[in-house]
Amino acid sequence: MAIQMRRGAGADFRPEKMKPGELAVTIDGTRKVYAAFAAGDVKELASKEDIWQEVEDAEKAQKAAEAAQAAAEIAESQATKAKNDAVIAQTGAETAAKKAEASEMGAETAREAAEAAENAAVKAKKEVESDKKLVEQFKNAAESADAAAQRSAETATAKATEATNSAKAAKEGQDAAEASARSAEEKASDAAASAAAADKSKTAAETSAERAETAANTATTEAAKVKTWKPVITNGILNFIVDNDPTPPEGYNVIGPEGPTPTITIGANENWFVNGVDTGKPSRGAKGDTSILTIGVNGNFYIDGEDTGQKAQGPTGPPGTDGKDGRNGVDGVSPEISISADGYWEINGTKTDKKAVPENGTNGKDGAPGAKGADGATWLFGNVAPTNQGKTGDFYINTTTYDVYSKATGAWVKTGNIKGATGPQGVPGTNGKDGAPGAKGADGKAATVSVGTVTTLQPGQPATVNNSGTENAAVLNFGIPQGQSGSGGATGGCAAFKIKKGFIADADGGIFPLVNYVQNQSVATLAADGSIDLAGPGAYTFEFNSLLELESEPNTALEVVCSVTDENYTDFGDIPGSRVNGSQDASKFIYAFTGTTCYQVVASYLRVTFFLASGVKGTALQDGYLIINKISDQHPSS
């Protein structure tokens, strides 16, 4: 059925009236196309240009959003950096102020310690001059002064380390005070030892006092060198200046107020605008060539003919939840459709311009003959598997096995078998009437007959013969009863030996037994070493049949050798072997040994072997037989 078309204004489009398989096109400039896939299932179709336009519009919107986000992130990053820089500057100012204050306090402590040392020295001098008894007190005072000076010096050292310039001066003052204290102690000790030493102690005390005064002056001078560093901000740059004013500096707020968030837009010229100002920077790059997007046979997206490696359709997602049932629609009104008297469709009594029954047109002219079609497939038949006959697309039936083959890319491929399994036995039918004599058939193929096995039966049993082969290639297996005792001789008989299948020589050259077991031990038995024990001297016939496979072509004739002594292997009879035609391949040569001969044996010991020359290795001996018939007890005298 052809696809039906509808057309009209977009405002008049009624999707519920579309039938499955119909297309509807708006012709009022709205450029819409709709398709009805089933009753009530109407979809709007988009053209390739529409899809690319939507993709392009989406890319524009995405790029604009990404650019706005990037600009916002840059502004946020710059604001954060400015805030962090201000915090770092404020922390540095506070740290510097604290260090300056600590340096000042350390210098003050050193100055106080120097004054205390000076006072102690003056006091010691007065006590030495007043009374000799006070020398011991002077000594204690000196020790106290020394201890005080030591503590002051340690404090001054700890505090001076934190200052850049005052630490050295404080340490020197401490050393001077400590030296004067030790000198005073030494002089006081001398005064306690003798009265004469008192004068020397006095002089030393005076010297100590002078030194203490000098140390105090030095400490005062060094303390005056302690400076106060105050922060100053000029043009937004934080600096520190020296100020002798010990008043702690005031704090500064180096973090400005939070600025407004910039407004970033894209202007009509498609440039970036910041707070309404055109930056001159385009919001997107130049438009490149439109790429062609297709889906390849491997299911991947291809852009301009190159495989993207991305699947056009992702893996099937989990089933979605059932949607809510929609509202019941209003029942439609079935239109009344009829055919007018002049053959036009009428809907609800209104006549349409559509013929209900098309008028017969004039017969068209015959077209030109078409081109010759390609040869069709041919069915071939044969009673063996196909080889190289036929062409691609042909079929072949093996009439022997009923196998079916098809030929593809120049090779026959077995595709099935047209012969079913054997059915159940049917109900016997009634005998039919004899038909008319048939025509004389063609001469049959010549049959082949070979001897299979020969079995010796008990005397008196009937002989047996059965065919283990086919009608055209018979293999006869004989069962021969043992004969009665002849006059003037012992009981005759036959012993059959089966050839040892799978015989393999382990080394190059050698002598190898051939028989595996005996079936009639009244004539001969098989010894443990592979030799044959005959039933006494007499006349025997030996019939041998087997195939031997070799790895290499022998350079001498192959024979089955019969021996009557274990030591010499005296060659008194043999059956020669001959190469089987067509048996040679890359690593196999097959020789057949078949024949019958008669021997008169004096000894009762017999070994039947292959004697392989050096350099010849037998690989396998196939099934065969050795038949030994005792025909008489007569034998030549030894």
Image (cartoon, rainbow, N blue to C red):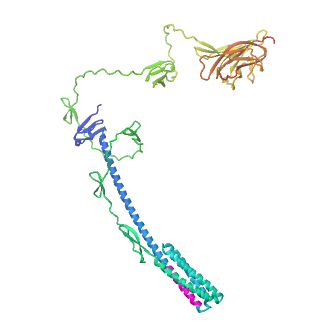
Residues in magenta, as a range: 108-128
Q: In which quarter of the image is the N terminus?
A: top left
Whether residue 79 sits left or right of residue 23 in the image: it is: right
Q: Can residue 461 be seen in this view?
A: no
Q: Is any atom of residue 625 visible in this view?
A: yes
In the depicted structure, whether residue 505 falls above or below residue 24:
above
Whole-percent x and y of residue 2?
A: 29, 31
Residue at the extreme bottom of the image, as rendered: 130
Tally of numbered tags = 0
Q: Is residue 217 above or below residue 296?
A: below
- Left or right of 592? Residue 343 is left
- The x, y position of residue 425, in whole percent, is 52, 21
Query: Along the line of sight, which residue is nearer the eye, 335 or 525?
Result: 525
Lateral position of residue 289 relative to residue 188, left or right: left
Q: Is residue 82 rendered magenta in the image? A: no
Residue 77 drawn at (x, y percent): 38, 59
Q: Is residue 126 magenta?
A: yes
Image quadrant containing the C terminus: top right
60 vs 562, nearest the viewer: 60
> Which one is in front, 23 or 507?
507
Q: What secondary structure characterizes most of the magenta part?
A: helix
Where on the picture, by quarter, is residue 26? Answer: top left
The residue positioned 57% from the left and 80% from the top of the image is 179
Would you identify the image quadrant in which residue 631 lies?
top right
Left or right: 533 in relation to 113: right
* x and y, in percent, of residue 18 in the image: 27, 38
